[in-house]
Image (cartoon, helix red, strand yellow):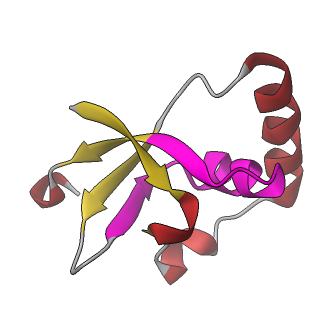
């Protein structure tokens, strides 16, 4: 897997993934990212003209809450997800 940076606004989050969002977990992760940096990149797959979130919704939302514009992630194969 190749790690690279993605613009946060370009990462599409499917509705069924968004339904699992826990705001308390986002807040806790945001604090941890401030103190330690993001240790685990998100996972995305290539969609139709965009990248689609596979794993890391809470990390993505925590970075948004911190005002970040980019996030590190792995581009994974779509057929596995």
Q: Viewed as shown, does residue 67 lie left or right of 51?
A: right
Answer with the quarter of the image where residue 48 lies.
bottom left
Q: Position of residue 81 (x, y in %)?
A: 23, 58
Residue drawn at x 81%, y 46% is: 25
Q: Residue at x 78, y 59 (%)?
A: 22
Give the number of callouts. 0
19 vs 76: above or below: below
Q: Position of residue 79 (x, y in %)?
A: 10, 59
Specify the segment rendered in magenta. 51-72
* Residue at x 71% of width, y 48% of height: 63
Q: Is 38 rendered above or below residue 27?
A: above
> In the image, is 51 to the left or to the right of 76?
right
Q: Pinpoint residue 59: horizontal percent, then vertical percent.
A: 64, 45
Residue at 88 percent across and 47 percent down: it is 27
From where the camera sits, is residue 12 visible?
no
Q: Nearer the viewer, residue 63 or 17?
A: 63
Q: Is residue 25 magenta?
A: no
Residue most toward the left?
Answer: 79
Residue 67 on the magenta span: yes
Q: Is residue 42 above or below residue 52?
A: above
Q: Position of residue 38 (x, y in %)?
A: 64, 28
The part of the image, by quadrant, that contains residue 1 is top left
One can see residue 19 in this view: yes
């Amino acid at each position: 897997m190749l790690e690279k940076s993605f613009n946060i606004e370009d990462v599409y989050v499917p509705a069924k993934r968004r339904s699992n969002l826990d705001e308390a977990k986002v807040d806790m992760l945001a604090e941890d990212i401030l103190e330690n940096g993001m240790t685990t990149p998100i996972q995305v797959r290539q969609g139709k003209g965009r990248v689609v979130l596979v794993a890391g919704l809470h990390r993505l939302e925590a970075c948004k809450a911190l005002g970040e514009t980019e996030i590190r992630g792995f581009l994974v194969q779509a057929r596995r997800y």
